[in-house]
Amino acid sequence: MPAAVSAQTVVLRAAAGIALTAGLAALLIWWNPVGLYPWMKALHVIAIIAWMAGMLYLPRLFVYHCEAEPGSKQSETFKVMERRLLRAIINPAMIVSWVVGLWLIWAGGFLASGWMHAKLLLVLGMSAMHGFLSRWVRAFAADRNTHSQKFYRFINEVPTILMIAIVVLVIVKPF
């Protein structure tokens, strides 16, 4: 049972971190000090880095988890790693990325920009990928994985391709 208590602690700490970050962000937005925009932009980039780190690592864990015999100690360890990565890092990072990103769009007046529409479409794709990863974490947790290592190796490239396209749109602003 110590692993379950430890997992709960991790999730509680992540929830507290999200609540604190959201509270501070709301306070700053309400206060709206001069120079807030670059700080929110920095928070957005930090959240994206955390989100992408998890989105790139989780499918690799799935590749290795496929090799483990269901019910084995190794399989149970992967289940804990996958659940903690999703709940403590990937989910909170996605939430912060979206909330702060939407504020940046509004505050920066980018809603009418064509490149922003394309970026939002790709970020929706990344969020859908996040949903698939969440579903596969649940499947592995129930020992009901139906995909192969090869499938997860391919899936591991999807967030990378989306990330590259998003970064190009943000930096180059081609339209």
Image: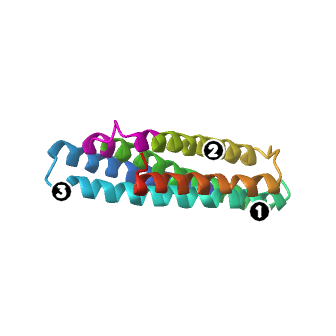
Q: Would you place residue 123 above or below residue 69 in this image?
A: above
Q: Residue furthest front?
A: 175
Mark 3 neighbour density, 10 Å: few (under 14) some (14–19) many (20 or more): few
Q: In this rendered view, identify the residue nearer to me: 160 or 86.
A: 160
Residue at the spot x=40%, y=60% of the render?
Answer: 46
Q: Would you place residue 175 above or below residue 13 in this image?
A: above
Determine the image quadrant of residue 44.
bottom left
According to the image, label 3 marks what residue?
35
Q: Quick check: can you spot residue 84? A: no
Does the CB distance between marks 1 and 2 fall below 8 Å? no
Q: Position of residue 97 (x, y in %)?
A: 42, 49
According to the image, label 2 marks what residue?
134
According to the image, label 1 marks what residue?
64
Q: Helix, strand, or loop for circle 1?
A: helix
| CA distance for labels 1 and 2 | 17 Å
Amino acid identity at mark 2: Ser
- Badge 1 or badge 3: first in the primary sequence: 3
Mark 1 neighbour density, 10 Å: few (under 14) some (14–19) many (20 or more): some
| CA distance for labels 1 and 3 | 45 Å
- Badge 3 or badge 2: first in the primary sequence: 3
Q: Position of residue 129 (x, y in %)?
A: 61, 44
**On residue 94, which mark appears?**
none
Q: Helix, strand, or loop for circle 3?
A: loop
Number of callouts:
3
